Amino acid sequence: PAAAAPKTKKLKFNAIASQPASADALTVPAGWRWEPIIRWGDPILKGAPAFDPNAQTPQSQAAQFGYNNDYLDIIVTNDEGTKALLVANHEYTNENIMFPPGTDPATLIRTVWEAHGMSVVELERKRPGKQWEYEKRGKLNRRITLTTPFELDGPAAGSALLRTAADPTGTRVLGTMNNCSGGTTPWGTVLSGEENFNQYFKATGTDVKETRYGLSATQDSRNWRSVDPRWDATNPDYVNEPNRFGWIVEIDPTDPTSTPVKHTAMGRFKHEGANVVVNKDGHVVAYMGDDERFDYLYRFVSKRKFRKGDTKQARKHNLKLLSEGDLSVARFYGDGLEDGVSDGTGEWLPLTVNGESVVPGFTTEQVLVYTRLAADAVQPTKMDRPEDVQPNLVNGRVYVACTNNTDRGKTGKEGATEPNPRTANKDGHIVEIKPTKKDHTGRTFSWDLLLICGQPGTAGTYFGGYTGPVSPISCPDNLAFDSVGDLWISTDGMPSALTLNDGLFKVDLEGKNRGRVRQFLAVPAGAETCGPVVHDQDGSVFVAVQHPGEEGTWAVPQSHFPDYVPAGTTAKPGDFAGPRPAVVQVTKKRR
Ligand code: FEO
Ligand code: CA
Ligand code: CA
Ligand code: CA
């Protein structure tokens, strides 16, 4: 209960001013400091060379921290609070600023395959409150890339829809990609969402099973198929290769020899991430967003129950919880806007029951592999790009970041609805869901909009009823909670929506300040803010700074984050004037 929770005294801050979109600075509140823990290209595996921006190879990249860190967790692993595991996703690559002009195209493609995926890195510090440093030779350090073998599990594993010439069993996939957000499970594994996988494939684009996922004949500008035919779904040997991406993957960061898993039971769409809560009856429930304009909010309920304890048997049991269960999709009902607020009730529409399809015309395998099509058939609510969906363990509610949807209300598209109340929604909103009787497995819920984002004072914005000053906020993407249950939101898209850099914001959820938004940090030019991780009782906040300087070129960087080496002074490897995506820690300055 909120009343008994400790106060977040160590995280008092005065909101920073919004940062103009041209500013190439990471800005934190007065009295706070920041530094990178680890950057793109930093060596993490034995034998890894130092980062050399002029000579990256597939081999060096495979042993170094990957590119464009998105999901982040810092999992403290000892009682003293001096050891931790950093787990990060590497969503995609910005070839224009990663490689010098003239780089051999095949080398470039093979190198970026190794820059995708995930990293596990050991951290150490002298004592709580001190800065973390990463262990270059940590025993648990690991890279998972587009060449790492994965096991497909669950009801669709082995399906004819998942077989290719290279994998006639339909159970073993090389790699993961476009890993966006994720979640750390109560049993200590990390989930990661495979999001915009379509952009890497050439497809015929003539079948709804392709077009509903954005697969077309023209969108693979990276031309990976020139190096490996599996990226060409028009090749009869690889028509099913796109079906092997778009899953929730699970990795065990404590076991570098474990085979990561793709969970077919959790459905296939453009997964933003998955966050798991143990329901009061012991079933585990994962909430998941499908990040596309007019797509849906999903829920997975495990067949089996969570087992407490740190025994080997409990761990083995829990590692299978996401392999069997039921998938449903959300429909929202508004109660009318006469009451002045967006709110109402909702229900979870089942796609499978007892592990079997309940969608007319769809087999179970089809529901799981073509989940978007199966969901369309039951008419869920078309949302404004659901990104992170995060259960709040303090108040029992669930928060959904709808990042934006500038197509809402356009000719031929759905107009405003109570849960998505603005046409041309460039700023996004936050949905707050209250499961009926706090039961995450129940059929029904009630909901309201916590925030309707934007420049405060402009038409249509709403800040939870709070009428005092708030920071401008737009395009909410990743969500986190601190120990008292207040909400932290990182953003992706403020430069185009508000001509302000993206940032990290704290939102009060209870009492007279409910809906008060205060900006904690701003990221440099071109970057989006990811993570975030809030260790308020420890006085530290972590963010993943993704795609800094994305709009720049190799010759003319848009950003010099995080090293701010002056241009033209590339004297030694690592002295790189261009930007490097990095994980940043923010702590109080010592007096
Ligand atoms: Fe990769 Fe939904 O943002
Ligand atoms: Ca209403
Ligand atoms: Ca995201
Ligand atoms: Ca994003």
Image: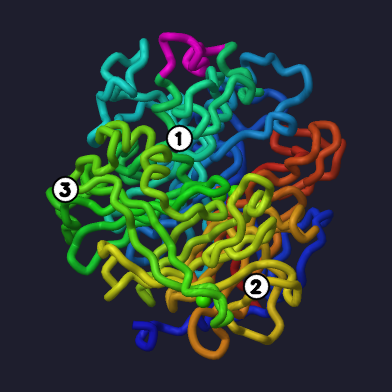
Residue 260, image x, y percentages: 33, 35
Residue 158, image x, y percentages: 25, 24
Callout 3: SS: helix
Q: What residue is rendered at 78% in x and 22% in y?
A: 101
Q: Residue furthest left?
A: 313
Residue behind mark 3: 317
Q: What residue is rendered at 75% in x and 38% in y?
A: 576
Image quadrant containing the C terminus: bottom right
Span highlighted in magenta in the image: 227-239
Residue behind mark 1: 143
Image quadrant containing the N terminus: bottom left
* CA separation in Å, label 2 and label 3: 44 Å
Q: Is residue 123 above or below residue 449?
A: above
- Which of the two discs, 1 and 3, labels the residue nearer the N terminus? 1
Q: Is residue 58 left or right of residue 142?
A: right
Q: Amino acid at mark 1?
A: Arg
Front of the two marks 2 and 3 = 3
